[in-house]
Image (tube, helix red, strand yellow):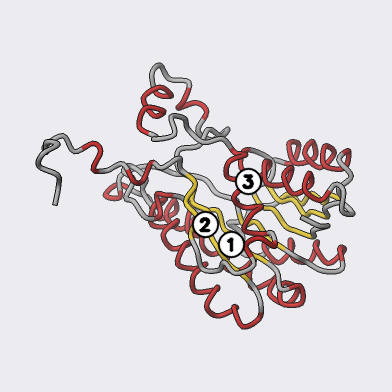
């Protein structure tokens, strides 16, 4: 990838951090990446920004909460310092889990604000510059957006909405030369999920379910995002790229009710 001007949200940790580092590495020999980095964790964001600068990138950290409606516009304004914008990784996310019967309205509203409203507002704020560059907008979704995941509460519904948001934008903005896609991680080891994976037997149990035999790493997702942002994906738009080691294709593999000579219909 040549020199890139990009915004990465949820950049301080996990997948967002891996995306920022991947973009910086790819552009290191081509003029360097120019990145606006957004997260609520200001100290960790500053550490990442310094690491990126040592790699030859320009990094502008913006501490903010994307559940607030003015935050996406602030990121687009920060990117004006680069004289344009080539790509956006709308990656910020979180989970508030519970059964829908008991789910709080404020939790529902916040998770939709971060996973759906924020990408929409960020896309709107960046549209003019992405049109000039014929750029790329990538939203981090989830396999939970296409597969109900109890007790995920509003998480699955919000990720499903994010996938459809990207498809809608891809159709509306295709004539402007803007590509919009989603990446849907499967089970991925990040700071948000690390505590769960430290419980006895959880990692081994989950690895056994994945055809490739391991849970994902942030770098696996970052690689997919970088691909969708780059020139090799120039004819890909409105697509949900699943990065899960084959997990979502295993439903029938767990159906033990049929025999080899009696395949499922």
Badge 2 density bin: few <14, some 14–19, many ≥20, Cα 10 Å: many
Residue occupied by mark 1: 118
187 relative to 148, above or below: above
**Closest to the observer, 200 or 87:** 87
Say what secondary structure mark 2 lies in.
helix
Q: Which residue is mark 3?
A: 222
- Would you say 145 lies left or right of 120 here? left
Quick one: SS at disc 1? Answer: helix
* Mark sitting earlier along the chain (3/1): 1
Q: Is 117 on the left-hand or right-hand side of 26? A: left
Residue underneath mark 2? 115
Q: Nearer the viewer, residue 76 or 21?
A: 21
Query: Left or right: 148 with respect to 29?
Result: left
Question: Outermost residue, bottom direction?
Answer: 175
Residue contact between numbered discs 3 and 2, judged by CB atoms under 8 Å: no
Label 3 vs 2, first from the N-terminus: 2
Residue 242 position within the rendered picture, expressed as x and y whole percent measured from the top left? 47, 51
Could you tell me if the residues under marks 2 and 1 are in contact, i.e. CB atoms within 8 Å? yes
Q: Nearer the viewer, residue 236 or 93?
A: 236
């Amino acid at each position: 990838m040549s020199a890139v001007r990009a915004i990465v949200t949820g950049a301080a940790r996990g997948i967002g951090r891996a995306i920022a580092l991947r973009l910086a590495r790819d552009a290191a020999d081509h003029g360097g990446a120019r990145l606006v980095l957004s997260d609520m964790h200001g100290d960790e964001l500053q550490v990442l920004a310094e690491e990126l600068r040592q790699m030859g990138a320009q990094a502008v950290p913006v501490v903010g909460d994307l559940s607030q409606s003015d935050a996406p516009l602030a990121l687009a304004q920060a990117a004006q310092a680069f004289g344009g914008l080539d790509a956006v990784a709308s990656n910020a996310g979180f989970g508030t889990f519970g059964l829908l019967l008991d789910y709080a309205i404020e939790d529902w509203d916040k998770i939709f604000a971060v996973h759906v409203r924020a990408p929409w507002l960020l896309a709107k704020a960046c549209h003019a510059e992405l049109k000039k560059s014929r750029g790329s907008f990538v939203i981090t979704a989830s396999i939970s957006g296409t597969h109900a995941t109890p007790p995920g509460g509003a998480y699955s519904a919000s990720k499903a909405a994010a996938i459809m948001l990207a498809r809608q934008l891809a159709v509306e903005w295709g004539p402007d030369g803007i590509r919009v896609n989603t990446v849907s991680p499967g089970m991925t080891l990040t700071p948000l999920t690390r505590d769960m994976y430290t419980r006895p037997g959880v990692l081994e149990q989950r690895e056994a379910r994945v055809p490739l035999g391991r849970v994902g790493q942030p770098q696996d997702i970052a690689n997919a995002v970088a691909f969708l942002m780059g020139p090799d994906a120039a004819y890909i738009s409105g697509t949900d790229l699943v990065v899960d080691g084959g997990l979502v294709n295993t439903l029938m593999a767990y159906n033990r009710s049929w025999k080899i000579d009696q395949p499922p219909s």
